[in-house]
Amino acid sequence: MKKELTISVFEVVGSPLCVASNDGEKVYERLAPALREDRVVTLTFHNVSILTSAFLNAAIGQLYGEYSEERIRTLLKVKDMQPDDMVLLKRVVETAKQYFKDPQQFDQAVRDALGDDSDGE
Amino acid sequence: MRPSVKDILSRNGFLSHYGHEKIPDHWGTTIPYQRFDVKDDRYFADYIETELIHRSEMPTMSQGLLKKFRGNIFEIFSNAVLHSRTQQGIFSCGQFFPKRDRLNFSVVDLGIGIRQNIRDITRLGLSAEEAIRWATMGRNTTKQGSIPGGLGLKLLGEFIDLNGGYIQIVSDAGYWKRTNRTTTTATLTHPFPGTVVTVEINTADTNSYKLAHELSATDIF
């Protein structure tokens, strides 16, 4: 069995502020090769004070373009996350699953944008 | 320019960039005008911490509100960095209105605007007004290829719906505002050469922003 790996987001980014997409990309560049090698990775958010969806999309969301949900669920763990940051990550993950599942989304988006608002406004 | 607007812009340092006299901010209610480069996210973060979060003049806000507000401000900034293609930077300023319990904060870029960005990437020929509606819907994104997106403005809208403030977006000739869970849009006679996102929050908001039930780390993926 391959050795489990722990990656500290704070150390990869070099800051508690995880805001920019390109900082998220640095985390992705550490995560993706590990998952490719079937290694179990724990991503720790210890010392991270701010997270944005842009950062999480780049760091984790784009994994769904490369790996199956099942593989990510089996190999990737997160820890030391604030409860509301976990909710944000869950939203990012759900959006990413949809994004990579539905290549027709732009067509639908046109109909949504040009038709009536769907939220009852 | 309305005298009240001129007064605020003279206090926050905006007009002094254009040769006007700077009026001292005796009340300590302005969040100074500042320009950032797109690579300045840490400098922007320091500015937010110093001028907004840890300032004694700012109202006491609940920890939940403060964290949500701060997170959403960074979402707006990262949107400008990702999408605007601005060559001239990103600009911010704000104003606290203690009597009304309101705090306004704006992030401005002088980039290509939302309409042009959508047109370039998705080939959708939307009007400037439609383009803002499209960008705020949640599932739509101009991010292409390997990195998904489209969540930032949706999250901001949800926060403002709960808080009772407003979001106003001006981009190109498009105007969009959301308040009281209702969105209004319009087409402006004079387009703005970029995008302005203004958020007004109710600083007396007592919503806890705590989760109804906590999510387990094993339920995320």
Image: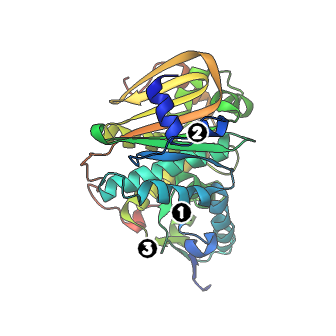
Q: Residue at label 2?
A: B14
- Which colour assignment does the render follow? rainbow
Chain to which mark 1 belongs:
A
Asked whether B25 or A107 is in front, the reply is B25
If the image is split into quadrants, where does the C terminus of chain A sit?
top left
Q: Are marks 2 and 1 in contact (CB under 8 Å)?
A: no
Mark 2 → mark 3, Cα distance in angstroms: 41 Å
At label 3, the amino acid type is Asp
Report, in whole angstroms, how far the alpha carbon at label 2 lies from the one at label 1: 52 Å
Q: Secondary structure at mark 3?
A: loop
Chain bearing tag 3 is A
Q: Position of residue B31 (x, y in %)?
A: 48, 47
The answer to whether residue B151 shows anywhere in this view is no
Q: Circle 1 is placed at which residue position?
A: A70
Q: Secondary structure at mark 1?
A: helix
Where in the figure is residue B191, as x and y percent of width and height?
64, 21
> What kind of element bears circle 2?
loop
Callout 3 crowding tier (Cα within 10 Å): few <14, some 14–19, many ≥20: some
User: Mark 3 sits on what residue?
Assistant: A80
* Residue type at tag 1: Glu
